[in-house]
Image: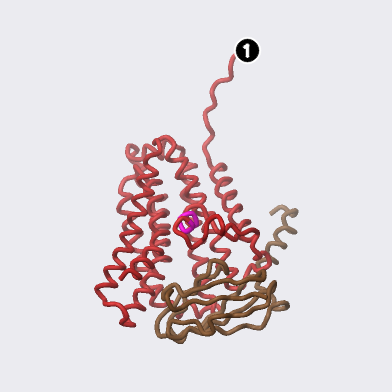
Chain colours: A red, B brown
Amino acid sequence: MLAAMLIVFREMIEAGLIVGIVLAASRGVPRRGRMVTLGVAGGVAGACAVAAFAGRIAGLFAGSGQELFDTAVLLAAIAMLTWHNVWMAGHGRSIAQDMRRLGTAVSEGRRPLAALGIVVGIAVLREGAEAVLFLYGIATSGGTSIPGMMLGGALGVAGGAAMAALIYAGLLAIPAGRLLAVTGWLITLLAAGMASQAVAFLQQAGYAQAWSAPLWDTSWLLRDASLAGRLLHTLIGYTAQPDAAQLAAYLATIVMITALARAVRPPRRTAPAAAG
Amino acid sequence: MPRRFLPALAAILLGLAPVVAVAAAPPITLMIQNHRFVPSTLVVPAHRPVQILVRNLDPTAEEFDSSSLKIEKVFAGRSQGTLFLHPLAPGRYRFQGEYHPATATGVVVAK
């Protein structure tokens, strides 16, 4: 039971972090709880489907199906996160914060909300598929009792939910005026980390190998496999041995999101020039 | 697209092309059997890309996990797949089966 709890918890940490950030980023938007719940439910259903077809997916593309699937899913999440930030920048801070008051903005607010819901679903799907495969393996091998396994798995999921609650509470400690900017940056770094991770999957499948030698190794400072390492891996894309291709993708994602958001920002009303 | 970006774009696309097996060593076979890696020690040449053909003979899935090798891949029960390792500096790189960490452990030795 303990093994089930630990392994499921490890997978759920990443999804829990993303749910917490999404909840904080969508604070004040009507019915966002429903969208996040839909995202989680969709992710769970998707995880079961992916687990069921894991063998078939992996067999595609000369055995690289799993890596390409992960890459495609990560790219979709990056697109959704980018779209969210660009939408928020384009519609101006005042509208984003007054969504409850402006009638037409309610339906408008659903669009970036749907994008975040998809991101939640993708995160739960990716991590959940591994957890489902693991639990199914235990169930069929008869090593642990089924109730023990279910309890362990449920505790692991609860741990992931606790992670979401922790980061959500932590973000809410930020003054409301700055929360939008902070969640905007968290979302940008989330997307950049996903880009770096997608590159690692491609390299694992034999692509993008030209730049795959590690640039440095900070395992002495923070190991990838430690709890803090996994948290930072999701939050900012930390990896102890990044290579040039990963770094390039990371920086390119940050530049892309920042430039696109800046490009759509409505012109600010400048203060009248001082006389004289 | 401005013409001056073409050389950079070409360089990026070339870098992304699937690795041509000119300098790669022949693939090594690794089996997962009874929740153990067989063999548990793999010796590979250093500084060259390496392919590992993994065959999961068990009925249930296993996840090959190694942060030092930067590999994370699930192998469904009774399936096989290929892992591509980046060129390794000489040393020992541990890996484990995340679903059965007590028994499924191994090390890649690069010389």
| Residue A108 seen anywhere in this rendered image of the structure | no
Q: Amino acid at mark 1?
A: Gly
Crowding at label 1, few (<14), some or many (≥20) Cα neighbours within 10 Å? few
Q: Horizontal and vertical percent for residue A170?
A: 38, 44
| Residue B25 seen anywhere in this rendered image of the structure | yes
Instruction: For the C terminus of chain B, give its image quadrant.
Output: bottom right
Compared with B52, A211 (above or below) is above
Instruction: For the N terminus of chain B, give its image quadrant.
Output: bottom right
Q: Horizontal and vertical percent for residue A135?
A: 34, 74
Residue position for label 1: A276
Compared with A209, A182 (above or below) is above
Mainly helix, strand or loop, the magenta region? helix
Q: Is residue B84 left or right of residue A128?
A: right
Residue shown at the point (66%, 74%) measured from the top left:
B49
Q: Where on the picture, by quarter, is residue A146? A: bottom left
The chain letter for the residue carrying disc 1 is A
In this view of the protein, which residue sits in the foreground, A133 or A255? A133
A273 in magenta: no
Which residues are drawn in magenta? A229-233
